[in-house]
Image (cartoon, helix red, strand yellow):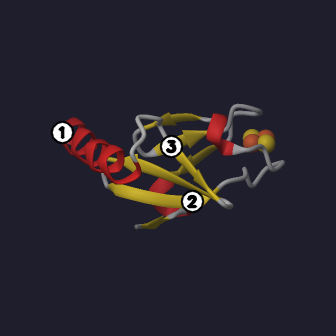
Amino acid sequence: MTTIKYLYFRLIFALKYLTFNKCLVKKDDLIIPTSNGIFSIYRFCPHQNAPLENAYISNNIIQCHWHGCKLLINKKGYKI
Ligand code: FES
């Protein structure tokens, strides 16, 4: 069920923002589709400010590519 919800929000994200990328950069925010909806989170890592658009995204978790800090997208961001 989670996969279907993720695919649904991923499709909504692609139609709304016209991109198949895993995320979209908007000013200082990242727009990311998850199985819980489409979220906006601050673009930089809270550890040492790495830009998170290059981070690994796995459904609801974003893992910083510099030191591996994991963030729950639905806790750190807000639903849009
Ligand atoms: S800068 Fe992101 S984990 Fe260190």
Q: Which residue is mark 3?
A: 23
Label 3 CA crowd tier, 10 Å (few <14, some 14–19, many 20+): many
Picture coordinates of residue 74, whole percent (x, y): 45, 59
**Point 63% across, 35% down: residue:** 55
**Picture quadrant of ligand 1:** top right
- Residue 41, labelled with which disc? 2
State left or right for residue 39 relative to residue 15.
right
Q: Quadrant of the N terminus?
A: top left
Residue at 51%, 36% in the rendered image = 57
Of the two numbered discs 3 and 2 on the same chain, state the one appearing first in sequence: 3
The answer to which of marks 2 and 1 sits earlier in the sequence is: 1
Dot 1 or dot 3: first in sequence order is 1
* Residue toward you, 15 or 44: 15
Q: Is mark 2 within 8 Å of ligand 1?
A: no
Q: Secondary structure at mark 2?
A: strand
- Could you say which quadrant of the image residue 67 lies in? top right
Q: Amino acid at mark 1?
A: Ile
Depicted 27 relative to depicted 23: above or below = below
Question: Which residue bears the numbered disc 1?
Answer: 4
Mark pair 2, 1: CA separation: 23 Å
* Most foreground residue, 65 or 70: 65
Residue type highlighted by circle 2: Ile
Tags 2 and 1 touching, CB below 8 Å: no
Give residue 49's position: percent from left, percent from top: 80, 50
Distance Cα–Cα, label 1 vs label 3: 18 Å
Q: Residue furthest right?
A: 48
> Would you say the beta carbon of the disc 3 residue lies within 8 angstroms of ligand 1?
no
Q: CA distance from mark 3 to mark 2?
A: 11 Å
The answer to whether mark 1 and mark 3 are in CB contact below 8 A is no
Res 41 → quadrant: bottom right
- Disc 3 residue type (three-letter): Cys
